[in-house]
Image (cartoon, rainbow, N blue to C red):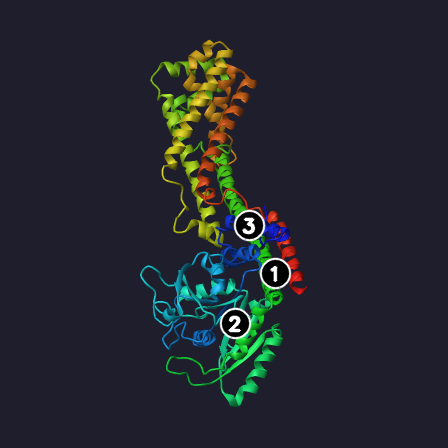
Amino acid sequence: MVPEGQDRGAAGAVALLEQSRSTLEALDLPLNVTGAAEARGAIQAAVAQLDDYILPRFRTLDAPLLAVVGGSTGAGKSTLVNALAGFPATRAGAIRPTTRQPVLLHHPSDRAWFADRRILPGLNRITGTPAQGATDDYAGGTESAAEPAGTSLVLLADRSIPAGVAVLDAPDVDSISDDNRRLAGQLLAAADLWIFVTTANRYADAVPWALLLDAARRDIEVAVVLDRVPADVEAEVRTDLAGLLQRQGLAAAKLFVILESTLDEQGMLPAGAVDPLRAWLEELAADASSRAAIARRTLGGAVRSLAHTVRAGAAAADDQNAAGQRLRKMVDGAYQAATDQALAATQDGTLLRGEVLARWQDFVGTGEFFRGIESGIGRLRDRIGAFFSGKPAPSVVVEAAIESGLQAVVVEAAANGAEQADAGWRVDPAGQGLLGGDDLSTPSAGFSDDVAREIRAWQSDLLDLIRSEGEDKRFTARMLSFGVNGLGVALMVVIFAATGGLTGLEIGVAGGTAVVGQKLLEAVFGEDAVRRLARKARAQLQERTTRLMQAEAQRFLSRIPAEEQQAEPMRTLADQLQAVGAKTDSEAAE
């Protein structure tokens, strides 16, 4: 059901705006890519403006206008508000910052519009009276312990303020207080129109003009008050400021001049000093169509600005997704290279160096053993059988040497992967942010032990393959003679015995070693079975090595947001908001 005072078009706009709020609030921009900080700030500001102004205004298009008085430090904002009220409603003084709790002046008949937190719902309400308005407790001077600065809004009702327009005294836009600057921005974003106060010697300052240019971009109704102007330069200064306003797209802004004068003992301007401004506000208050046009024009500009923020949010989401993909690619590439490095070392003869080769030679016998190969596999089997029946070093010694050598290869490869991934992330701002103070350039604690367990498990799998193949051959005498562990060791040697990584004498030794293992296995299982066993064993080793590297890569990958941002729906939403803003603009012009 459409709420009272809200047409169906406005109800549809409210639904779209609520969707926009949910979308922006859910948008996560955790990666420190270029522009991310600005996008986060813009999104936060947009959500706040939706709550403070856009949604409330769309829901109640006939509510009174809120005119926010803003400007630089010492421009005379509070003095101006006091003059409009006809009594010292807010504190004005030389000590900065002065405006601590903003004061909202309204006609008594408009109280309900502002007391129920229709706008600026995050600010508590303090109800004052004109008599209290001149005291520190309610005049924007000191805050009570229960109401810290920047958390409350003082409501002062007085018939000097015309019904239909409320006036709010905001903190300095360039305040030395961060909280005051934030609050000033929040209040200006919630305004239907701005009364911007500057002085004869500061009207060209950068900070005021940055805000005025923002007002121009958003089509906000602006009245500029040029305060403390010496009478002898009034015409010159008025003409210069009017020219600046016109050149910056603010030709339609109302310009009011307050001549330099002496304040009375209550800090009040002379009677009549603000009559032109008061008359303009009263004219607006008396003309419902003019008020509606201003409200719709400012609202249309705010919605178009929101559309821009949503579209920028979509671009920021794209940047986040691209950064996440880039960081993943770095890690995937580093650990794929590490996996390839480890597996290459198991296939190029590298492992048949040093300790592994020595233990294998001890296992099968002396050099005379190799010279006996030519006498036939039967004699080879007999000699190996005799070897097993004697007192050689057990096969477990060879297995241990292989485990140790393979472990060193995998750990070294993982260290290279970690170093490469860490270095890649550290030169990328997004990666730097995810790493923080953590150093991931070395393998994780316990990785070496994990590798050892996986290698032992692989060796166990390999023995299972031997047993399974032996079951098919019904444990021939040859197999019983050599033993499952002996055959397993031979199979490991065959797998590692390629000579691509060896040089000089090592090639001959490793080659002879491979021949011994190959002949032995073929004598037991046959040539085809040996190839099948070797292929399966290599595949299992590759699977375990890959799994180890992937687990290490997760140290990096788990820091990247798991889900990508959905940018395209946001672009569609931005287009819809743009249409709503344009429609609201056209209604304001009617």
In the image, residue 244 above or below residue 536: below
Foreground of the two, 336 or 277: 277
How many numbered circles does the render carry? 3
Q: What is the number of the mark on residue 319? A: none
Residue 215 % position (x, y)? 56, 68
User: Of the residues shown, which amino acid type is indicated by label 3?
Assistant: Glu
Q: Quickly name the residue at label 1.
A: 300
User: Of the residues shown, which amino acid type is indicated by label 1?
Assistant: Gly
- Left or right side of 383 for 22: right
Q: Can see residue 531? A: yes
In the image, residue 222 above or below residue 576: below
Residue 409 % position (x, y)? 43, 36
- Left or right side of 390 for 533: right
In the image, residue 564 above or below residue 213: above
**For the residue carrying disc 3, how many other residues have a C-alpha within 10 Å: few (<14), some (14-19), or many (20+)?**
some
User: Of the residues shown, which amino acid type is indicated by label 2?
Assistant: Ile
Q: Earlier in the sequence, mark 2 or mark 1?
A: 2
What kind of element bears circle 2?
A: strand
- Left or right side of 286 for 394: left
Q: What is the number of the mark on residue 195? A: 2
| Quarter of the view holding residue 405 | top left
| Quarter of the view holding residue 302 | bottom right
**Rounded to the nearest whole Å, what is the CA distance between mark 1 and mark 3?**
16 Å
What kind of element bears circle 3?
A: helix
Q: Earlier in the sequence, mark 1 or mark 3?
A: 3
Q: Quickly name the residue at label 3.
A: 18
In the image, residue 266 above or below residue 504: below
Foreground of the two, 184 or 488: 184
**For the residue carrying disc 2, how many other residues have a C-alpha within 10 Å: few (<14), some (14-19), or many (20+)?**
many
